[in-house]
Image (tube, rainbow, N blue to C red):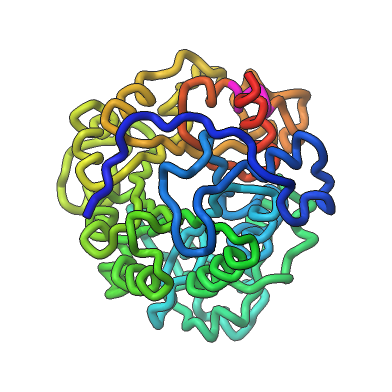
Amino acid sequence: MTERVTGTPGRRTLLGAAVLGTAALGLTGTAAQAAERGRGGSGSGHGSLRDLPVPTVIGHRGASGYRPEHTLGSYQLALDLGAHIVEQDLVPTKDGHLVCRHENDITGTTDVADHPEFAGRRTTKTIDGVSSTGWFTEDFTLAELKTLRATERIPGNRPDNTLYDGRWTVPTFEEVLRWADQEGRKRRKPVWLYVETKHPTYFRSLGLGLEEPLARLLRRHGRDRRTSPLILQSFEPGSIQRLARLVDTPRIVLLSGPTSRPWDFVESGDPRTVADLIKPAGLKWIASYAQGIGPTLDLIIPKDAAGRLTRPTTLVKDAHARGLRLHPYTLRNENSFLPADFRRGTDPNAYGDVFGAYAAYFATGIDGIFTDHPDTALLAAADFDGR
């Protein structure tokens, strides 16, 4: 069954006291209030899309601005900072376990290159039309993968995060579900997760389909209902449609650049591009099986040749007219990731005017945003609510 969202959700006011750990993290006053913007429901098992605050702050791969991404340490920090939802990306192991990595190529996110016993596993593969050389999760059993340790993916941009290299293993999704259940009981409110199927067509071609084992785990942990505190997402609409037949959990279609085509479209010969999907007819089609879209920020406000923001598109209005939520991606604090008009100074890794960038995007009416720095986003959301 597909839940259709009607209307545009209103903003929520700040609720409650500071989240556990915010004092130790140095969040006081308004920051502590922002960190505890209310999550809907009580207990660890039920929620509703309508209960989510607007703007919703989504911890992108956890709090990946401060910890190596997709580790339990990154997820825990995102939750402690007050993120309304914590994101996971899923890829399979050789023996069919779902693990949390942004890509199945683990060369840059683990210490696999330091393990001589796996030197022979280094190989070149073509995934969704892109050739990559490295080590890949589908060539490792879970037991083998658990001998590796997670590392910072972009140490040049975030050298401080390398302090935590080697501290955590690659988590399985089932471990994350158990963690979320435990944290939900502790906090007496549901811990929301945002779960992406990565390269689903590619993995299905290997006999490692993602959707069926994911659905089994969701059922096991009671997150298979339309009121479950979890959102499913994929860049491949076919993966979301398959999941819609398996579970009632809320679903989002991710959208890349306007000229790109979802890889399942490429494989099936569907000529539509993202530019087609963001037209009213494309949005109507998405709304027939999903509750929202996750567009790149450039689909909300394009940039000019100099990298500066231009005029917003009509995507927010058009998507809301079809009852779809919008959770664009990804805003980060560092200059190198910001629109040119919000960069400050010449150091690409220094923080720019990210609050100005948040204000520009929030003003378009988006319902939430993916961010590597949840605490910053929460303060920006509090500023927006205070207007």
Q: Residue at x 57, y 21 (%)?
A: 360
Please indicate whether residue 302 sits to the left or right of residue 169 in the image.
left
Please indicate whether residue 89 sits to the left or right of residue 60 in the image.
left
Q: Residue at x 45, y 38 (%)?
A: 327
Q: Quadrant of residue 27?
A: top right
Q: Residue at x 55, y 54 (%)?
A: 86
Q: Quadrant of residue 168?
A: bottom right
Please indicate whether residue 150 sits to the left or right of residue 159 in the image.
left
Quadrant housing the C terminus: top right
Q: Is residue 110 visible?
A: yes
Q: Is residue 159 magenta?
A: no
Q: Is residue 122 visible?
A: no
For residue 326, above or below residue 314: below
Tally the marks: 0
Q: Is residue 356 magenta?
A: yes
For residue 355, above or below residue 184: above
List x then y, in percent, for residue 281: 18, 30
List x then y, in percent, for residue 220: 39, 75
Q: Residue at x 17, y 39 (%)?
A: 271
For residue 26, above or below residue 343: below
List x then y, in percent, for residue 48: 41, 49
Quadrant housing the N terminus: bottom left
List x then y, in percent, for residue 312: 44, 17
Q: Give the main secondary structure, helix, strand or loop, of the magenta stretch.
A: helix
What is the span of residues highlighted in magenta in the rendered image?
A: 354-359
Which residue is at the front of the view, 155 or 89? 89
